[in-house]
Amino acid sequence: MASKILPVKGTREFYPEQMALRNFIYENARAASQAFGYQEWDGPFIESLELYAAKSGEELVKKQAFTFTDRGGDLVTLRPELTPSLARMIAARQGELVFPLRWWSFGPFWRYEQPQKGRSREFFQWNVDLIGANSPEADAELIAVAVTFLRSVGLTPQRTRILVNDRRLMNAQFEALGIPPEQRMDVLTLIDRRSKMDPAKWEAYALEIGLTPDQVKHLKELLIDESLWKTSPELTRLFDALEALSVRDYVAFDPNITRGLLYYTGTVFEGFDVSGSVQRAILGGGRYDNLLADVGGQPLPACGFAMGDVVIGIILQEAGLAPAFIPSPAPILVTMFDDDHCLHTLRLSSELRTAGLKVITYPEPARLPKQFKFADRLKIQLALTIGPDEIAQGVVAIKDLRSGEQTHVPRAEVVHAVRTLLNRS
């Protein structure tokens, strides 16, 4: 017996049950995006590593990207994120596009991480971006799109929360603490790691990157100040806009939110599942006003966010919010009586499909009980039979598999009869 070939570590297999959940996430993401007028787009799955090298941070490029040399000798990578591709594509056609530009995408990404629950090396991601608007109200719109999705799948403010900060506010605080500009990215990384490290080790790390004990003391005080946002004109306007957009109940300020990527310049936010003892990240984003110029375009303000499908899928399943799996998208089976009458079966199936109904045709003659059992396992509602007796009488036998009742209807009235029976469910 040949040995089984296992899937590549960290990849995912989508059986119909898993595909249904992925499609549920996609459909609600699409609906939320389109509700605010965003257009769907996508970029290449393989990119030059150079695109990410100076934009996304050393950890992503050196540790997480799936990089390889292609047959032409170029160093490329499976895309670990989409924002640099977005910036490059907009820069290439900047004079032709209509701004402010609203784009969204849902597609596959790859990161070389240690596979575990909630994290795989292959994942799908929803990306939403607003390009060409430089206002807290634009940032609020992005957050409102995210909240619209959370609401649509049944997640409440008690279960999910979006935490917001602003790098401009944090830079002003760093300035007051005497932290020089060249050290601030290290401090943002320090803050980003705070919830993941033992407090003593975190303080030791703070000293390692060059902070003084006094700076560490004041930084810790800063990171528990929940009213700090009121000193920021941008965040004050942001929260007013969120109130006007009727999503304020999902959003709170948190000075610990920094986002690890280099290109963020202003508002940053992350969405979390807050129902358990450990918060799980659902989505994240922010303002990135310099990225277009960095890839050769004219400077344009921009903001956006991304949400992976893995964690949100787990949360929906745990909360009982994932849709019930329906084994077959077709509620009708047309049985195959025998070889001599199979064309009647095919004609009837075609007629029903032409009328807009979804139909499975049994692919070969078999005992009717076997075909009914097949239909029952797929949760099919109606089984239609057109054998020699039905043909002679000009009727079709319709068995309602939900109730077990069987009726005969005239051949010319079968579409109407089927629709009537389906509408009773």
Image (tube, helix red, strand yellow):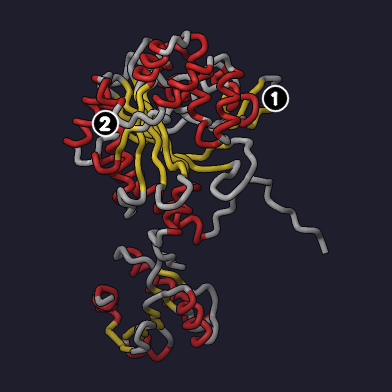
Residue 410 found in image quarter = bottom left
Residue sticking out furthest to the right: 1
Mark 2 lies on a secondary structure that is helix
Residue 393 found in image quarter = bottom left
- Estimate how packed mark 2 is, as few (under 14), some (14 to 19) or many (20 or more) residues with alpha carbons within 10 Å: many
Residue corresponding to mark 2:
140
Quadrant housing the C terminus: bottom left
Residue 82 badge: none
Please provide percent x and percent y for residue 160: 36, 47
Give, as a three-letter code, the residue at label 2.
Answer: Ala
Residue 220 found in image quarter = top left
Cα–Cα span, label 1 and label 2: 41 Å
Residue 380 visible from this viewpoint? yes
Mark 1 lies on a secondary structure that is strand
Residue corresponding to mark 1:
69
Q: CB under 8 Å between callouts 1 and 2?
A: no
Q: Is 52 positioned to the left or the right of 138 in the image?
A: right
Please provide percent x and percent y for residue 174: 42, 15
Q: 415 or 133, which lies in front?
A: 133
Vertical position of residue 283 compared to residue 258: above or below: below
Vertical position of residue 114 compared to residue 171: above or below: below
- Which residue is at a point 37% across and 10% down the rendered structure image? 298
Vertical position of residue 306 compared to residue 169: above or below: below
Please provide percent x and percent y for residue 414: 29, 78
Viewer-nearest of discs 1 and 2? 2
Q: 164 or 245, which lies in front?
A: 164
How many numbered callouts? 2
Please provide percent x and percent y for residue 187: 50, 20
For marks 1 and 2, the one nearer the N-term is 1
Vertical position of residue 69 compared to residue 16: above or below: above
Give, as a three-letter code, the residue at label 1.
Answer: Thr
